[in-house]
Image (spheres, rainbow, N blue to C red):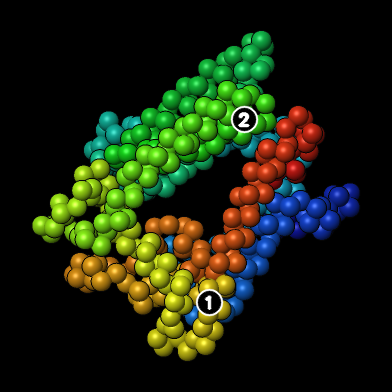
């Protein structure tokens, strides 16, 4: 994409005049993304494993190079989308891909025998479709569903046109497929985590349209989720020092609430990962053989992308050592992306990532009343 973009820039003088750094820096979302990229570059330069931080590990491939590709992709799309028709084509392409993914996930559930031959992976009770992991599939669907809802709201306002009614019917059917596949990809109560985007969409829509009812429904649902999460997670957090992680240990039932009882088999050891990662952020220990002399600066700039697998060994939970040594598994993620960013690119990097989210939501809310309709693509993207 960058090669085509450069070729177009060289050949088209009119297009060249339209492009300028002013257009990039005039948009706060672009600035937030560039700052995030700059801080990641800094973390890579001072990484305890520079090569891994740049190229990414074999398993995750989430190093600086991958991030730079995403930033370039983002900026090119931001420059290319200049009207609503382009934006709608992009959204419809995204929805079409989600239709394929959702349909294959549902087929996978009813015909699990095809998983080995078609998907090259055995079916284990939770669909993974073409993405290969139920959690990744759920995240993708959770991000796509608000786009579908936005198109439904847009189409409903133009339902008097016959073709819009047909589009609305298709979108509603797609919404049912998306939620169906999302449900099949989850277990127990974790489905609640993936309806947060749906609730946030309702709240933003209520703010944009000035509908107090939508704001109230969304706010009530969000408070309800917080209460449910607190009732389930706080006991686990308070008693995690007494609970064990492996299902074979007899002390599993020694506390009022355990992760097994609420159907979250892995939540106990995830809590251990989170607490140990927080210890890593507080102590900033020196990693053996790294000759690291930055000390407390690691809190701000991190140890470098993809270095968690090395730094986490310094704070590995005692309760997990026997189990993980037996299975010979190294932990390369704390299963919490915010903690991962803080540990790898520092607190400054985490704040810059949060600023991207904050700026995006601010633009969504402040973009009501048609103020940015003519340049919606450039304004938001």
Residue 367 percent location from the top left of the image: 73, 36
Density class for disc 2 (Cα within 10 Å; few <14, some 14-19, many ≥20) is: many
User: Residue 205 got which mark?
Assistant: 2
What residue is rendered at 57% in x and 25% in y? Answer: 214
Q: Is residue 76 visible?
A: no
Under circle 2, the secondary element is helix
In the picture, the disc for residue 298 is: 1
Percent position (x, y) of residue 193? Answer: 41, 41
Position of residue 253 relative to residue 45, above or below, is above
The percent position of residue 243, horizontal first and vertical second, equals 21, 58
Q: Residue furthest left?
A: 250
Q: The N terminus is located in which quarter?
A: bottom right
Q: Earlier in the sequence, mark 1 or mark 2?
A: 2
Q: Kindly identify the residue that appears in the image at 30 percent across and 56 percent down.
A: 238
Task: Return the residue nearer the eye: 267 or 179.
Answer: 267
In this orientation, which residue lies closer to the viewer: 34 or 5? Answer: 34
Q: Say above or below: 21 vs 191.
A: below
Q: Quadrant of residue 139?
A: top left
Q: Quadrant of the C terminus?
A: top right
């Amino acid at each position: 994409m960058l090669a085509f973009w450069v070729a177009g820039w060289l050949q088209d003088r009119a297009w060249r005049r339209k492009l300028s750094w002013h257009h990039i820096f005039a948009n706060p979302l672009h600035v937030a993304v560039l700052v995030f990229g700059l801080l990641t570059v800094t973390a890579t330069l001072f990484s305890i494993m520079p090569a891994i931080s740049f190229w990414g590990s074999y398993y995750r491939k989430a190093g600086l190079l991958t991030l730079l590709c995403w930033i370039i992709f983002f900026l090119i799309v931001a420059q290319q989308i200049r009207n609503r028709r382009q934006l709608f084509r992009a959204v419809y392409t995204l929805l079409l891909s989600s239709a394929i993914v959702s349909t294959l996930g549902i087929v996978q559930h009813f015909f699990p025998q095809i998983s080995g031959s078609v998907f090259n992976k055995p079916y284990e009770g939770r669909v993974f479709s073409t993405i290969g992991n139920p959690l990744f599939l759920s995240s993708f669907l959770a991000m796509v569903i608000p786009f579908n809802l936005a198109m439904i709201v847009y189409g409903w306002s133009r339902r008097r046109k016959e073709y819009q009614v047909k589009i609305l019917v298709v979108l509603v059917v797609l919404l049912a497929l998306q939620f169906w596949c999302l449900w099949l990809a989850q277990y127990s109560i974790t489905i609640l985590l993936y309806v947060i985007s749906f609730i946030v969409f309702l709240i933003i829509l209520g703010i944009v349209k000035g509908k107090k009812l939508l704001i109230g429904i969304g706010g009530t649902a969000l408070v309800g989720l917080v209460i449910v999460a607190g009732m389930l997670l706080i006991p686990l957090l308070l008693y995690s020092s007494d609970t064990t992680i492996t299902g074979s240990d007899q002390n599993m039932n020694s506390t009022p609430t355990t992760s097994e009882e609420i159907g979250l088999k892995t939540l106990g050891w995830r809590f251990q990962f989170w607490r140990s990662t927080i210890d890593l952020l507080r102590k900033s220990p020196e990693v053996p053989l790294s000759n690291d002399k930055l000390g407390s600066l690691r809190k701000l700039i991190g140890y470098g992308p993809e270095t968690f697998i090395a730094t986490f060994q310094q704070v590995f939970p005692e309760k997990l050592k026997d189990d993980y040594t037996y299975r010979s598994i190294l932990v390369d993620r704390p299963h919490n992306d915010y903690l991962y960013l803080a540990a790898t690119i520092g607190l400054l990097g985490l704040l810059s990532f949060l600023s991207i989210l904050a700026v995006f939501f601010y633009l969504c809310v402040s973009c009501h009343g048609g103020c940015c309709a003519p340049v919606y693509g450039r304004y938001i993207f």
